[in-house]
Image: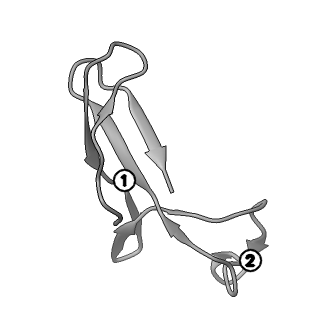
């Protein structure tokens, strides 16, 4: 993950804490990824991802109101 920065919640001005969203599959756990474009279905893997750039998603959560904001 990239360097975390301090953010202020756009809803309540509370303090935002960096974290991540887990992407769970059959027997696997990874950090959620962002992929450009529309999803293309695959019979074998669910989605076609070969050759596409994948960026880790960092999610910030407000400690006051619980608002989530994600960045790739």
Its colouring scheme is: one colour
Q: Which mark is residue 68?
A: none
Badge 1 crowding class, 10 Å Cα cut-off, few under 14, some 14 to 19, many 20 or more, is some
**Could you tell me residue 65's position as x and y percent?**
29, 18
For label 2, the residue is 42
The residue under label 1 is 21
In the visual, does 4 lie left or right of 40? Answer: left
Residue closest to the far top: 12
**Front-most of 45 and 3?**
3
Mark 2 or mark 1: which is in front?
1
Decide if residue 23 is on the left or right side of residue 8: right
Mark 2 residue element: strand
In the rendered structure, are the residues bearing label 2 and label 1 in contact, judged by CB atoms less than 8 Å apart?
A: no
Q: Quadrant of the N terminus?
A: bottom left
**Residue 2's image quarter?**
bottom left
* Vertical comparison of 70 with 37: above or below: above
């Amino acid at each position: 993950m990239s360097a975390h920065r301090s953010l202020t919640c756009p809803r309540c001005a509370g303090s935002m804490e960096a974290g991540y969203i887990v992407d769970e599959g059959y027997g696997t756990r990874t950090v959620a990824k962002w992929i450009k474009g529309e999803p293309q279905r695959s019979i074998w893997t669910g989605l076609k991802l070969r050759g596409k750039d994948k960026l880790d998603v960092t999610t910030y959560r407000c400690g006051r109101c619980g608002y989530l904001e994600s960045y790739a």
